[in-house]
Amino acid sequence: MIERHLMKLRARDDLTDEEEQAIRSAVADVKEVSADQVYVRAGDPLTAATLLLDGIMCRAKDLRNGERQISELNVAGDFVDVHGFTLKQLDHNLITLTDCRVASVPHARLREITEAFPHLARLYWFGTNLDAAIHREWELSLGRRTAYARIAHLFCELRARLELVGLADGDGYDLAVTQGDIAECMGLTPVHVNRMLKQLREEGLVEFRDRRVAILDWEGLARAGEFDPSYLYLGRRPRED
């Protein structure tokens, strides 16, 4: 049920059998959520964290005129709001972009885990720091990268993150979002996104069609987006007990 989450953790660190069992036993329930739903609304009190099992969710904030800015995409295996454990509410919405399957982990059980397993507490603290690193990289894209480079970088990032949980390979990955969703990630209009996707395809770098990102030239795509995966901290880290 939570295999992709465990894959994500094990890709960077070791887990003991006891730690794995503690994570599994922390899940209270699992539910299906349809696409385009506000799953957690900004300001609502939180008593549980959300673990994304399947699908794509996002963090987003809206202006009064209805315009939306997505600040991160969440993929299978992500704890999408573990920072709510300490904040007790969010300053942004959590939205399902596709049909999703999510698990609920009560804050009381997270507290038990952090007290009984300091190593897991550090792993989940690392996860919140990783979210912050992703936000900083997206801020750089929004502020300084061209529209062309923003989209190329996004496709590179998603390949790296999805590959970590077995959902991408050298040829590409499924991505059931719309060009409008990409526009809200990148601070662009859907028309501009369409134009940049056409350019990337014509240059033989990547093709986004039928809910799939087909990577035609990985090295070229990475150059186009100036993609340096160091902010994703993908390497194995020595375990600290």
Image (cartoon, rainbow, N blue to C red):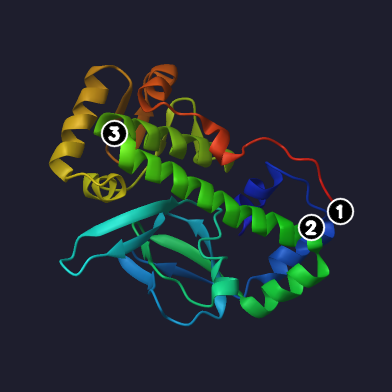
- N-term mark: 1 or 3: 3
**Residue 181 place in picture, x, y as percent:** 27, 50
State the count of labels. 3
Residue type at mark 1 is Asp
SS state under label 2? helix
**Residue 57 place in picture, x, y as percent:** 41, 58
- N-term mark: 2 or 3: 2
Q: Quadrant of the N terminus?
A: bottom right
C-alpha gap between disc 1 and disc 3: 43 Å
**Residue 2 place in picture, x, y as percent:** 62, 58
Pointers 1 and 3 in contact (CB under 8 A)?
Answer: no
Report the residue marked by disc 2: 119
Image-quadrant location for residue 234: top right
Foreground pick, 47 / 174: 47
Report the residue marked by disc 3: 208
Residue type at mark 2 is His
Report the residue marked by disc 1: 241
Residue at horizontal 66%, vertical 58%?
125
**Residue 34 place in picture, x, y as percent:** 35, 66
